[in-house]
Amino acid sequence: MGKEEEAATTLLEETLEKAGGCGVIDGGLATQLEIHGASFDDPLWSAVCLINDPNLIKRVHLEYLEAGSDILVTSSYQATIPGFLSRGLSMQEAEALLEKSVRLAIDARDEFWSAVNKNAENGYNRALVAASVGSYGAYLADGSEYSGIYGQNIDVTKLKDFHRRRLQVLAGASPDILAFETIPSRLETQAIVELLEEENVHIPSWICFSSVDGKHASSGECFEECLNVINKSTKVAIVGINCAPPLYVDGLIRKFKKLTDKLIAVYPNSGEIWDGKAKIWLPPQCSKDSDFGSLALRWRDSGAKLIGGCCRTSPGTIRDISKAIKGKP
Ligand SMILES: [Zn+2]
């Protein structure tokens, strides 16, 4: 590990230590933007807000900090250069929007920290900014991040080419973490790990997978295959699960504990189920799924080092998690 990597990893370790051994990630960004009236009937999904209403993104970051987040995930999940180009933006404009997604989170973090830092009693920590990197499927916006079915013509080289420039721009904007989210397959894991090496990225990364059955990656492949690829990389500090139902999380933490020594992050969705045909959210199969405070305690005890929420979770969810594991917001 080089000096720059060591410094970045130390910052992450310090944040976890200050949080009492288990840090709090934020919750659903798009969900909260929608609560404030934003609408995302657009292939760019929440990234459209980077163009239309960047101040609202900052406001939501501040709400999550207030709720007790130690890590803010940026609004770049579905923000891609080809996505912006297809909207008629120039390359320069597209790259500026990616930088802006990191800037908005850093500004919110700095503003919040300078306000609360003066009073140690309130118990907040200086948050870290994780630049979100959605999977190739998130760019396709066809649900393939939950199946890993990217078509026969997609190979490691093509996936690296898709991820490369965005990764360079996001890393150049100096986030504390690079957060690869909703990765469905071993193939895309391989592409990311190779790319981090080729680009010699010094910012620690996390790679999080979803799961549609509670046992396998979304592609149907064993997590062992995906984690074996990650275990060989010094660039990836954290692995985990995002946007799976809470019901699957405890079992997956236990499975991951056996397969890797990396830190484990979990930030499931609310457990509600998206009915793609009717375009509505259906209630969770089990009503206890929504009790994130007690779930967070169980996940921490099973070995998770970072806990938060994904789609349909809110600052209320994050406040419950933070109170449960830290005894404070
Ligand atoms: Zn989600």
Image: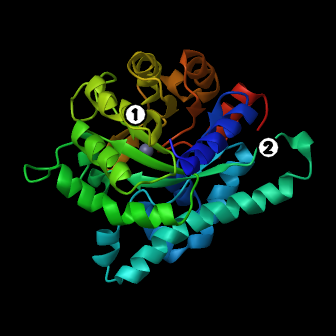
Which percent across, then down, holds residue 178? 48, 51
Q: Residue furthest left?
A: 152
| Beta carbon at label 1 within 8 Å of ligand 1 | no
Give the x, y percent position of residue 109.
70, 57
According to the picture, the residue beneath numbered tag 2 turns out to be: 124
Mark 2 within 8 Å of ligand 1, using the beta carbon: no
Q: How is the image coloured?
A: rainbow
Q: Nearer the viewer, residue 157 or 266?
A: 157
Query: What amino acid is found at the position of numbered circle 2 in the picture?
Result: Tyr
Badge 2: how crowded within 10 Å, few (<14), some, or many (20+)?
A: many
Q: Residue at x 35, y 80 (%)?
A: 91
Element carrying mark 1: loop
| Tag 2 secondary structure | loop
In the visual, does 259 lie left or right of 253? Answer: left
Specify whether residue 37 is in view.
no
Q: Which residue is pictured at 45% across the width and 18% down the height?
A: 257
Q: Quadrant of residue 306?
A: top right
The residue labelled by disc 1 is: 244
Viewer-side residue, 114 vs 290: 114
Residues at marks 1 and 2, CA–CA distance in whole angstroms: 28 Å
- Looking at the rendering, the quadrant in which ligand 1 lies is top left
Compared to 112, does 94 lie above or below? Answer: below
Residue 68 in percent (x, y) is at 72, 42
